[in-house]
Image: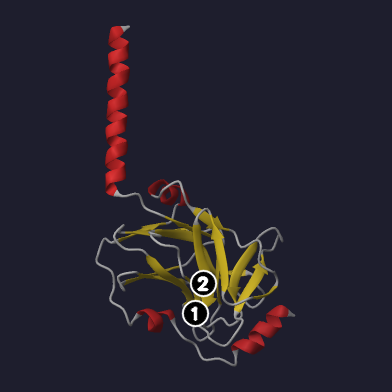
């Protein structure tokens, strides 16, 4: 029944695309954003202090209050949508019923995460599309970010499963203002969906330098101890 309601409601609204939302801002400089499709590489590039929201606390299936705030481990953000017509966030469960996803009630809008805590310079997660029945669909999506210096970055990709990972890190002199997930399947749009959203911080270059010096110092200490022995 919930999928039928989604179909009926989606016919009442005109689409607002991700491109229209982000085209108002200049693109980021080349090399300012790093893209990861391997979660281990992404987590290796960010600080150990990060926060992953699984969305398992949201109602599903059913409407989710719009906007909704999430927080943990010192980080916080807000989930909302480019549609201003009311409660447009929606909760889904996967086929096995053991995981929950956040998506939209109206597929032609963007799924937006914003109001990030200060200095977030890394974001990643499972971003994909779902169909009218609430199932994963092999559909291309667009993932865009707006940074604190008003520059933007957008990447299009087709996730092979709900577990497909996409991570973005960016220059430490800017922070994240918004993440927007949109579909590319007009005129038959699917529902932008997210799971396991991780926010974090990229360590400053000076931090890596200090770690390197510490490692060199430790190695020298071990060598001296061995010679003394």
CA gap, disc 1 to disc 2? Answer: 7 Å
Q: In this view of the protein, can residue 167 be seen by the observer? A: no
- Residue lying at 70% horizontally and 83% vertically, measured from the top left: 4
Q: In which quarter of the image is residue 101?
A: bottom right
Q: In which quarter of the image is the N terminus?
A: bottom right
- Residue lying at 55% horizontally and 61% vertically, measured from the top left: 71
Q: In this view of the protein, can residue 41 be seen by the observer? A: yes
Q: What element does badge 1 sit on?
A: loop
- Which of these two is toward me, 58 or 140? 58
- Which of these two is toward me, 163 or 19? 19
Residue linked to disc 2: 139
Compare marks 1 and 2 and give the one earlier in the sequence: 2
Tell whether 158 sits left or right of 61. left
Q: What element does badge 2 sit on?
A: loop
- Residue lying at 50% horizontally and 66% vertically, measured from the top left: 77
Q: Looking at the picture, does residue 60 appear above or below residue 49?
A: below
Residue 140 point in image, percent of width and height: 47, 72
- Residue lying at 31% horizontally and 74% vertically, measured from the top left: 150
Residue linked to disc 1: 185
Residue 52 point in image, percent of width and height: 53, 56
Q: Which mark is residue 45?
A: none
**Badge 1: residue crowd in 10 Å (few <14, some 14–19, many ≥20):** some
- Visual colour scheme: secondary structure
Residue 65 point in image, percent of width and height: 63, 76
Residue 112 point in image, percent of width and height: 49, 74
Q: Are marks 1 and 2 in contact (CB under 8 Å)?
A: yes
**Badge 2: residue crowd in 10 Å (few <14, some 14–19, many ≥20):** many
């Amino acid at each position: 029944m919930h999928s039928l309601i989604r179909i009926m409601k989606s016919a009442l609204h005109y689409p607002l695309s991700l491109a229209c939302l982000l085209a108002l801002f200049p693109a980021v400089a080349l090399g300012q954003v790093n893209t990861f499709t391997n979660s281990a590489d992404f987590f290796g590039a960010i600080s150990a202090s990060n926060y992953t929201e699984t969305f398992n606390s949201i109602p599903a299936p059913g409407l989710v209050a719009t906007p909704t705030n999430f927080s943990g481990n010192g980080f916080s953000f807000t989930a909302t949508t480019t549609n201003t017509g009311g409660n447009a966030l929606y909760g889904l469960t996967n086929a096995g019923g053991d995981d929950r996803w956040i998506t939209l009630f109206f597929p032609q809008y963007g799924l937006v995460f914003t109001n990030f805590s200060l200095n977030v310079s890394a974001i990643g997660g499972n971003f994909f599309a779902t169909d009218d029945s609430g199932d994963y669909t092999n559909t291309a999506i667009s993932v865009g970010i707006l940074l604190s210096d008003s520059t933007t970055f957008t990447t299009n990709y087709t996730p092979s499963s709900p577990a497909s990972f996409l991570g973005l890190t960016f220059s430490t002199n800017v922070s994240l203002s918004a993440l927007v997930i949109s579909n590319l399947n007009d005129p038959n749009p699917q529902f932008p969906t997210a799971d396991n959203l991780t926010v974090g911080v990229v360590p400053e270059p000076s931090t890596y330098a200090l770690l390197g010096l510490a490692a060199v110092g430790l190695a020298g200490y071990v060598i001296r101890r061995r010679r003394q022995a």
